[in-house]
Amino acid sequence: MTRREEILDVAESLLESEGAQALTMRRVAQEMGIRAPSLYKHVPGKDDIEAGLQERALRVMATALAPAGTDLLAIMARYREWALTHPGLYELATRRPLRRDVIPASVEAAAAAQIVAVAGGEHRARALWALAHGLVDLEMADRFPPGADLDETWRAAFTPFR
Amino acid sequence: MTRREEILDVAESLLESEGAQALTMRRVAQEMGIRAPSLYKHVPGKDDIEAGLQERALRVMATALAPAGTDLLAIMARYREWALTHPGLYELATRRPLRRDVIPASVEAAAAAQIVAVAGGEHRARALWALAHGLVDLEMADRFPPGADLDETWRAAFTPFR
DNA sequence: GACAGTAAGCTAACGTTGTTAGCCTGTCAA
DNA sequence: TTGACAGGCTAACAACGTTAGCTTACTGTC
């Protein structure tokens, strides 16, 4: 395992366990028993760490969705659950410009493949993805009234696409 | 006009003209011809400025959508256009936790009213909002392939809800 | 075995951010 | 006249990403 991968491991677990505001260069370094400036011997900067985590997020998200097979509602239920339980990685995966300069196109394609397969056309695939993303994003930002029945909202959202 | 409102005016125009990274306390103060610490005589902190702008964003967004009347596709076209031309305010309006402690519930209700009116039920209203938000958010984050026909995507997205 | 090169750590420091403490000054009411 | 207070100010703090420059230990070559 390269030192860069170790850094990504630490960064990932920090992001998962303590959230985005804990992902600082000094904190990552501390967790590795070194000082922040030493990280720059292995990594160009924080952007690169985030790009690495974006790639990981896309991969792990794809494998998390895979078991849902071709059932649209099942896929979307998993999408929602994964996003809500991994908010830091989800944010990196979806709310940052895709680092096409760093991440192989195959990773992007794999992440999209399952939805594209059930969607019937690229435009519907984008719509389904956007719908799931929008619902998750608004839920995470506490935008729906407290106590709203979001399970029912998800059903109502996707049934028009059956 | 209170000094707080002046601050919000400056903050808003800074956000609109130069984007989120220009919205700093020092920059706002500079634009007013004073020093950053003096802002705290009128405002508790940056969070409060952002809460104020969130309220303004919700109001101005509602009035921007109003002329579209009850035509779903027209409303959504305006939603998209407003969001893309006001990314800073849009982010405040949708991607931050709603500051219910600062913003009157009536403002939230007014912002949602138009979509609720055409949706047919709260669950469908949430779905429509999420769909528009997701599409906009992904477009802003450059997540669709360059050159994608997003007009067609928007049509494909909303026709199942007609 | 001596020596050069390099990998990988370190401290000190810089500029930027939001924010606080404490001071000064002008206005205005009692 | 005096005292309160509104609203400026400078200095400074902690946290952030990052850079410069130093040291140390290993590694391969003559």
Image: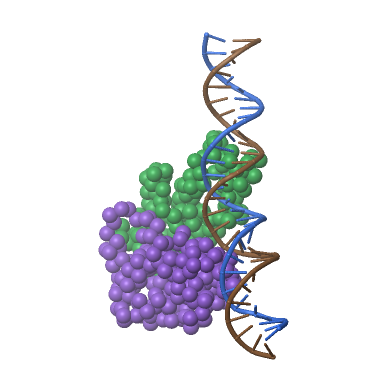
Chain colours: A green, B purple, C brown, D blue
The spot of residue B74 in percent (x, y) is 29, 75
Residue at image location 43% in from the left, 81% down from the top: B110
Q: Residue at x 40, y 72 (%)?
A: B129
Q: Quadrant of residue A154?
A: bottom left
Instruction: Say which residue appears at 37% left-offset and 55% top-offset.
Output: B142
- Where B137 sits versus C29, above or below? above
Q: Position of residue D8 (x, y in %)?
A: 56, 69
**Along the line of sight, the residue nearer the viewer: A118 or A109:** A109
Vertical comparison of A144 with D10: above or below: below
From this viewpoint, is residue B67 visible?
A: yes
The location of residue A60, given as percent across then percent down, is 49, 49
The vertical placement of A6 against D9, above or below, is: above
Which is nearer the eye, B139 or B43?
Answer: B43
| Residue visible at 41% across and 81% down in the picture | B113
Can I make out residue A135 in this image?
A: no
Q: Where is residue A29 in the image (x, y as percent from the top left)?
A: 61, 43
Instruction: Tell me if residue A49 comes above or below residue B130 in the rendering.
Output: above
